[in-house]
Amino acid sequence: MKPSLIIISIALGIILGFKIIESPKRMIDRMMMVHLCLFVISAGIVVTVNRTFIQHQDFIYIDTKRAHPLTHFMAMGMHGNGGYYRPDGAMDDKIKSPVARNQANVRLIQDRFRNFNGLTNYGKFLVQKQINNTADGTFGWGQEGTFLQLNNPDNTKLNRSFIRKMFANQGTVQANENFEYHFIVQLAWCSTLIGLIGVVNLHSWKIQFLKYSVVGFMLFLLLFEGGRSRYVIQFLPIVLILTSVGSTRILMRIWRNN
């Protein structure tokens, strides 16, 4: 399970804390308690089933001592554009001790922060990284090489279809330089971001929970490995829920004014 999923729990905890501060006598309303209980129970079931399956499966052997620590992804997120950096992975693979591996990554974080020569330059880096994280509506489609193969790539009829022309390149791999595809998808993504404006002044705890989750995910991508919009996919459902609400409010306001 992705460590970033804890962000949703943190967002819910913040909302619950504010709710208690706002109404200490009522504590939390009944509906919020129901949602909280359902969330905790569902999360507990998913985590338990996941861990049980991993511990008892015999498909592959999993050595948890070789896992990358969070400091590894934080150090990686401070290099270049903040995205994946192969030498960091190679360094971790060479270090067999989990403790020594974590210490090496902490030193790497310290060195890379010093290389920014101050908070101002680091802040500029984070601004550019945020742009890289959210600007590409294609989410990096087509930048991973040619591992996405099509079925029946030599089928002339299929290659003439609208879907193939939009998402494929000569019937063999995904389209990464298709202007028409990029334009349409980018237009849809810009519309999605504009729709988020419609929820800025909404204060219900459900909307606040979703907004805090989105902000939390963005902060996560700034602190850890990111630098590309494909990382947004993991919290895209939350963005789409918010933009659907925001877009509806914007369209309703336009309709009423007319």
Image (cartoon, rainbow, N blue to C red):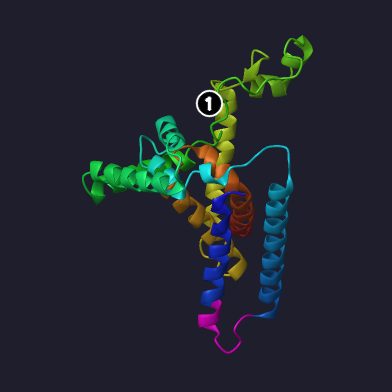
Residue 257 at least partly seen: yes
Residue 26 on the magenta segment: yes
From the image, give the main secondary structure of the stretch colored magenta: loop
Q: Which segment is the magenta one?
A: 19-28
Name the element at disc 1: loop
Q: Which quadrant: the C terminus?
A: bottom right
Say whether residue 235 is left or right of residue 222.
Answer: right
x and y, in percent, of residue 225 in the image: 45, 42
The residue wearing badge 1 is: 143
Residue situated in front as seen by the camera: 39 or 255: 39
Left or right: residue 158 compared with residue 65: right
Location of residue 39 (image quadrant) = bottom right
Farthest residue to the front: give it: 97
Q: Residues within 10 Å of mark 1 (few under 14, many from 20)?
A: few
Q: Nearer the viewer, residue 199 or 33?
A: 33
At x 62%, y 22%, the residue is 147
Q: From what the image shows, is residue 161 above or below residue 135?
A: above
Q: Position of residue 43 (x, y in %)?
A: 67, 61
Question: Which of 67/156 is in front?
Answer: 67
Q: Residue at x 68, y 14 (%)?
A: 171
Answer with the quarter of the image where residue 255 lies. Answer: bottom right
Circle 1: residue type: Gln
Q: Is 123 on the left or on the right of 211, as rendered?
A: left
Q: Position of residue 76 (x, y in %)?
A: 40, 40
Q: Position of residue 117 (x, y in %)?
A: 21, 44
Residue 160 appearing in the image: no
